[in-house]
Image (cartoon, helix red, strand yellow):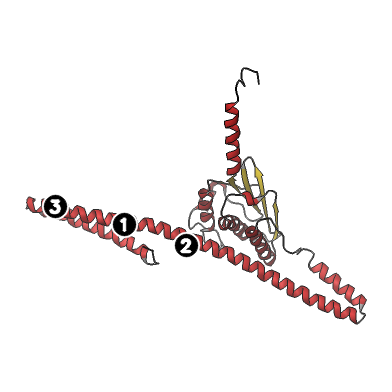
Amino acid sequence: MNLSKDKPMLIIYTILLETLFICIFNVKITLSQDINALKNFVPFANLIIVLLSGFALVSIRQLGDYTRRQTESRLLRDHLQHVEDLVNSLDIQRHEHTRHLQVLQSMLYLDEVDEAQEYLDGIAKHYWKNQGLVYTGHPAVTALLNSKSKVAEIKNIDFDFAIKCDINQIEVAPWDLCSIIGNLLDNAMEAAVEDEKSPQVNLEIKHENSYYVIYVYNSGARIDPARKKEVFMPGYTSKNSAARGFGLYLLQKLVDKYEGKIEVVCEPKTTFIIYLPDRGVKENDKKILLKNSREPGDASTGR
């Protein structure tokens, strides 16, 4: 049985019907004067209640599966959109480079060397900050970060990132990892644009103490320390937020799914820190501990 878009309403109707039936049954018990008739009705009433309850439980479970599939589908669509944006950006750059080469070729054929030199200097100055595609070693994250770089460029945000570990070893589904990083960056950029002087967003991924740690800094308004937990509540949003209050909520769910944790630092600048466990390191630690426990006489040898 697959849930369609209107199936969640069936759960509500089922629960309301069950509640109504119980109320009618209670009224019947209260008003009934025929005990024998009431006894005959009780098994039938119990059966109806059990059936309605079973149907409601099955529907709720399938609603959870439906929601999970919808979430995964949305994350995959977001990932494909990032890849498409990156491909379009590269296609535009290729077209621009081809046009510039044609202009330079024409100038050189016409022996306009000085003009070609000036034209080339202008191109180099314009593209000095745009160094092209930056590869991170992870195809999905590469597409995401390069597309976010384009978004930051459009919004005049100084965006920089540093990958200081092998992120292919992070045991998180590519679409989930992109959703975690993407939601962090979206939130950071929304905050950074409020900094009229020098909007800045930085991303850093490291491996520290058996965790893959994702740092995202932004130069926007500080988060009130008393409200750090509220930002992860569904529907919570700040002024001008494009995430509509569900980006950080989804982030929290994904981090919990992979047994990670989130830390929010408010000073000196807003920083979100995500800790994702390195399961491979944990497994190796267990093997080392097991091996050491089998080695005889550590205490007796004075080691």
Q: Which mark is residue 70?
A: 2
Quadrant of the snapshot with the C terminus: top right
Quickly name the residue at label 3.
29
Judge whether 117 appears above or below 144 on screen: below
Residue type, mark 1 in image: Ala
Q: Is residue 7 visible?
A: yes
Quickly name the residue at label 1.
56
- Separation of disc 2 and disc 1 at Cα? 21 Å
Nearest to N terminus: mark 2 or mark 1: 1
Q: Secondary structure at mark 1?
A: helix
Q: Nearer the viewer, residue 239 or 162?
A: 162
**Count of numbered circles in the view:** 3
Q: Which mark's residue is nearer the viewer, 2 or 3? A: 2
| Residue lying at the far bottom of the rendered structure | 110
Judge whether 99 appears above or below 191 on screen: below
Q: Position of residue 178 (x, y in %)?
A: 59, 57
Residue lying at 64% horizontally and 47% vertically, measured from the top left: 267
Residue lying at 82% horizontally and 67% vertically, measured from the top left: 125
Callout 2 touching callout 1 (CB < 8 Å): no
